[in-house]
Image (tube, rainbow, N blue to C red):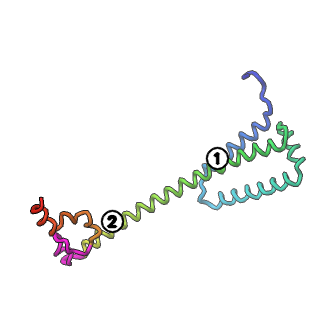
Amino acid sequence: MLDQPLDQPLIKAVLLVAVVVVTLMLNASTADSRHQAIRRLLLVGFVLLAAAAVLFPRLLTQVAQFLGVGRGADLLLYGLTVVFLGYVASSYRRMRQVEQQVTTLARELALRAAVHDTTRHRSRPGTARDASEGTAGGSQGGDQAGGDLPRGGGDQAAGPAGG
């Protein structure tokens, strides 16, 4: 089986080159306008090829036979497979970038909230919260001390008598 000559070597070479080109394009930076221009040119090329395949189906079959593929439909399937793999890889890459952005934003928001809470508590010396720290009557920051309510002032006096 390994000693057999390559059948359909031209289409195999074309498909391998297409896979390599898609891989290289996906590894390129997507931030610059050059990449967007290339993407738009490829889209225009795809539309023109699709229109040619619809308008002149025999042309697609002739190209397929020249490349060593039996039918134009098979050539179309091979091409769509390469495009689909490129789309999947590109979507995965974009999804990873969005996930990294969301993670960065969530961390930044958490840090800002922590800094805001810290500066808010420091900027109120001598307020009712500081005066009523050990009692359950302190209404400021009640959501933050919600887990500490059973240890609060009024409950401690009732706790030993009831237990």
The image quarter in which residue 46 lies: bottom right
Residue located at (29% from left, 71% from top): 119
Q: Which residue is mark 1?
A: 24
Q: Residue 114 shows which numbered tag?
A: 2
Q: Amino acid at mark 2?
A: Ala
Please say if 160 is above or below 64.
below
Q: Which residues are magenta?
A: 124-140
The image quarter in which residue 150 lies: bottom left
Q: Looking at the rendering, in which quadrant would you find the C terminus?
A: bottom left
Drawn side of residue 146 relative to residue 60, left or right: left
Query: Which badge, 1 or 2, comes first in the chain's sequence?
Result: 1
For marks 1 and 2, give the one nearer the viewer.
2
Residue 19 location (% of width, % of height): 69, 43
Cβ atoms at labels 1 and 2 below 8 Å apart: no
Drawn side of residue 106 relative to residue 138, left or right: right
Q: Residue furthest left?
A: 161
Q: Is residue 35 magenta?
A: no
Residue 20 location (% of width, % of height): 67, 43
